[in-house]
Amino acid sequence: MRLKQLLKNIREPPPDSMVGHMTGGDGRIMRHMPFVILFNLAWLFLYPILARVSFVQVILPTLISVPLFVYLHLCSYFYGGPNSIRLRYIAGVFLLGFVVTYFNLAALGYLIFGYFSFAFVVPTRIGWKVIAGVAALYIIEMYLLGHSKETILSCALPAVLLGISAIYAAHTTHQQAHLRRSQKEIMRLATLAERERIGRDLHDLLGHTLSVVALKSELARKLIDRDLDAARSEISEVERVARMHCRRCAMRSLEFAAPRCRRNSSPPLRCSKPGA
């Protein structure tokens, strides 16, 4: 993804991006989360600085890798399109982590970023296998680089534990998203059922009204030549019945419209009475 497109997506996250899904489910505040978690990059420099390792051999290669990581990280969160492309950005984060591990074991931080991104965009049954494979490759790389058992153990422990945390967090989020979709479907079906019920009521009410109007009109037609006053009375009755049933139809319509007014309005919308 080009930098111009990335900046545009950051300003207006696409609905099918990771940030778009997060803001849709948990509020707009989540659109800032990819930036907030970048403070964890301090992990990459904490140990090298405390251990006073070589700047050129350790810290400088790590500094050079940071802009590339930030680009891949933001692309994985703000890319709107096929999931296969998003997975390429996450794979780039993993690859960068393995490359920087040659210079700095704290590059595990890149792998941990990849853990959480990957776990959230694939099913759990796939996520845990890949994350376990990445942790195993990290441990193997440390062994091939000739690090001591103590060093390997101290790095392998957070690699495994944070991998488990990523899988659990993603699984919980997937379950919550599934629950939200189920609740929306239940509300949609309930609304549809209520609409159909009111439609049936209105159909029955209109059928009864039209039958009464037809009967009264026929009677008035027969009486108009014999008893004009009786015919006028029947016509007045037709008018009364029509008006009464019109009010009933309007009230039935408001039974359906009023809850929607309350849900969709802020402040609450007051529905006026028929004829007001």
Image (cartoon, rainbow, N blue to C red):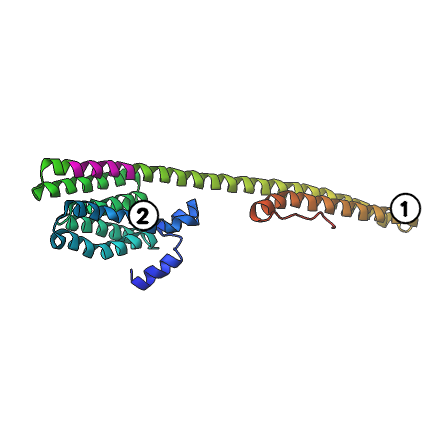
Q: Is residue 212 visible?
A: yes
Residue 164, quarter of the rendered image: top left
Disc 1 residue type (three-letter) = Ala
Location of residue 253 with respect to 4 vertically, above or below: above
- Residue at x 12% of width, y 43% of height: 141
Residue 25 is situated, as x and y percent measured from the top left of the image, at 42, 45
Q: Is residue 175 toward the left or the right of residue 163 in the image?
A: right
Q: Is residue 165 toward the left or the right of residue 237 in the image?
A: left
Residue 65, quarter of the rendered image: bottom left
Which contiguous range is marked in magenta? 154-166
Disc 2 residue type (three-letter) = Ile
Circle 2 SS class:
helix
Residue 143: in magenta span? no
- Residue at x 40% of width, y 41% of height: 177
Q: Is residue 227 visible?
A: no
Q: Which of the labelled discs sits on residue 230, or is there none?
A: 1
Per the image, the residue denoted by label 2 is 37
Instruction: Give the CA separation, mark 2 to mark 1.
Output: 84 Å
- Residue at x 32% of width, y 40% of height: 170
